[in-house]
Amino acid sequence: GAKTGVIVALIDIFKGFAVVCLAKFFAENAPYLDLLSGLSCVLGHMFPVFLGFRGGKGFACLGGLALACGPATFLLMVLLAAIIGFASSYICIAAVSMSVVFPLYYALTTGSWLGALILLLPSPFMFYKHRENFQRIAAGQELKLSFLWKNESEMNRTGHIAAVENEADDELQA
């Protein structure tokens, strides 16, 4: 449900934030270790060893890196993600867009293109993790952001209600 989703997202954001902050604290004289630690956290979230390399899509964890760079950076990235999400109608477009926008913003504001390159490394993996979302968009079956307030009409548009009804019928027959 929505409450669980928000809690999980906050935990994932905190995870990315904490890793970067700990790296800054314990290795303040090691340039880029904080970003490399954050990169490791995002990739570890996406491809966890103990879950057979099947994990999340990395968006919230990457948000934690943005938060560790500064609250203003995080808020700007959230605002841009919301604008992209509403403009495109799809959250997955916002997620993969931010995996490119955040590193570019970092480079422009810090002058560190090496740091931006480190932050850009998860981007192809985020595109890969969202490939099924893009396939559903192409097929007209991906739920739009309007699902949050137009639940039934979005379920009808994408055929999700029919799929749920078919599953229920199958369970009753079994």
Image (cartoon, helix red, strand yellow):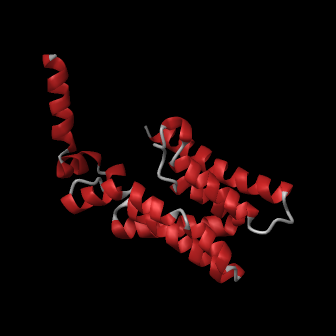
Please indicate whether residue 89 sits to the left or right of residue 78 in the image. Answer: left
Please indicate whether residue 128 sits to the left or right of residue 40 in the image. Answer: left
Q: Whole-percent x and y of residue 80?
A: 51, 70
- The total of numbered circles placed on residues is 0
State whether residue 49 appears in this view.
Answer: yes
Q: Whole-percent x and y of residue 154?
A: 24, 51
Q: Residue shown at 85%/63% (left/top)?
A: 28
Q: Whole-percent x and y of residue 19?
A: 71, 52
| Among the 4 quarters of the image, the one containing residue 162 | top left
State whether residue 70 appears in this view.
Answer: no
Q: Name the quarter where the N terminus is drawn.
A: top left
Q: Residue furthest top?
A: 174
Q: Residue shown at 15%/24% (left/top)?
A: 170
Please indicate whether residue 85 sits to the left or right of residue 50 in the image. Answer: left
Please indicate whether residue 162 sits to the left or right of residue 154 in the image. Answer: left
Q: Residue shown at 29%/51% (left/top)?
A: 150
Q: Whole-percent x and y of residue 111?
A: 70, 83
Q: Name the quarter where the C terminus is drawn.
A: top left
Please say if 80 is above or below 8: below
Please say if 58 is above or below 127: above
Q: Nearer the viewer, residue 36 or 111?
A: 36
